[in-house]
Amino acid sequence: MNLFQTLALIAIAALFVLTLIAAVRGWATRRDALLWALLWLVAGVTIMWPGVTKVIANALGIGRGADLVLYCAVVVMMIGFLMVYVRLRRIRREMTLLVRELAIRDAISERKPPSDEAISHEATKEGHFDV
Amino acid sequence: MANGQTTECETLPDSARTATFVVIAAYNESTCIEQVVSEVRAEYPNVVVVDDGSTDGTFEAAKRSATHVLRHVINRGQGAALQTGIGFALSRGARVVVTFDADGQHRAEDIKAMIAPIWCGECEITLGSRFLGGTENIPASRRKMLRMAVLFTRIVNRVNVTDAHNGLRAFSDRAAREIDITLDRMAHATELIDQIRLSGLPFKEIPVQIRYTDYSLKKGQSSRNAIQIALHYLLGRVLR
């Protein structure tokens, strides 16, 4: 094993242990922890035996093992971006609903007396004056 | 869509005026909001201003003039502010909800023609169209951009309207309840057209005038923005 392999494997082993701890302590969901653990395992294997990627790459018609890793990384990142974007949209939507709820609550709690015409309309609508 | 005038609705009863809520979404419009609100309020007692997180005293200016002032603590965009105002108006028993721009581009006297067909049960929604009515000082570039927007609406939304992005609209309470604007920013105009089509509620275009002033042009959308808005809308449709 060369220096890079040693260092990378130590880092990956640490991350793997961290993932296990996270799963046990409930910091991450079981499913997320499993996905991460799988990722570390694959990374560990390809660092330990770089030839593995070449075999798979050749089987798929890709020249070099490193290219296969690069392509996979790009695809994973694209999926990641999309997921973050979808989540961002949901958070924005929730924020709007929250801001709306606040605006309507404030308007109800500190309303000033409406004009005469507005009162007469409300009176007919609600059947009483509530000012 | 027929654009013929109906004679039975020529005079609106006072009850129609008091049951109409005019919703104005305002973002940093302190210089003109009072003027716009007082013009509208001269005829319609229920004016709802939604201050969309302005930083320039729009809220205080609106408080001095409007019947109801709501405040978004964070800026959420015009679509979000309109939806807030519409929801509030409905909770107050509005029978007709009108949306009106805060920058003074609409004329308060056009509101009557917008609500009359709804009050008379002729349709549930009316949409203002600057291309059916007269328009003052419309710049050529703005005209071209709006024509593109109409074409976009025809192709993507499959609705035939002459002016897809007019801020002057009116809804019956029933229609207002069906509308739920989820696109917070400017793409809401196109989303709205979609919802109108899907709801199947009868709508009608009403000729209105737009006053193009230096102020309203500055606050309006640039052509570059238009492409952004279109993309925002299309993404919104894919990622529902």
Image (spheres, coloured by chain):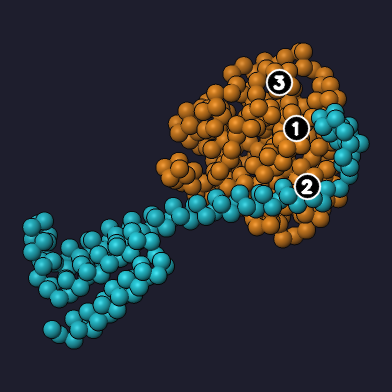
Chain colours: A cyan, B orange
Chain letter of the residue beneath label 1 in the structure image: B
Q: Quadrant of residue B211?
A: top right
Label 3 to label 1, Cα distance in Å?
Answer: 16 Å
Chain letter for the residue marked with disc 2 in the picture: A
Mark 1 or 2, which is nearer the eye?
A: 2
Q: Do labels 2 and 3 share a chain?
A: no
Q: Which of B155 and B57 is in front in this view?
A: B57
Residue B173, image x and y in percent? 69, 29
Tell me the residue at 76%/13% (across/down): B7
Report the disc number at residue A108. Answer: 2
Label 2 vs label 3: CA separation?
Answer: 31 Å
Figure quadrant of residue B234: top left
Label 2 secondary element: helix
Element type where label 1 sits in the image: loop
Circles 2 and 3: CB atoms closer than 8 Å: no
Q: Tell whether B24 sits left or right of B230.
A: right
Q: Which amino acid does label 1 sit on?
A: Ala
| Residue A105 shows up from this direction | yes
Circle 3 packing at 10 Å, graded few (<14), some (14-19), many (20+), is many
Residue receiving disc 3: B117
Three-letter residue code for mark 2: Ile
Instruction: Check disc 3 and give the amino acid type.
Output: Pro
Say what secondary structure mark 3 lies in.
Answer: helix
Please give the residue where the numbered disc 1 appears in the rendered image. B94
Q: Position of residue B145 (x, y in %)?
A: 54, 40
Q: How far apart are marks 1 and 2 (CA)?
A: 15 Å
Answer above or below: position of A62 versus B205: below
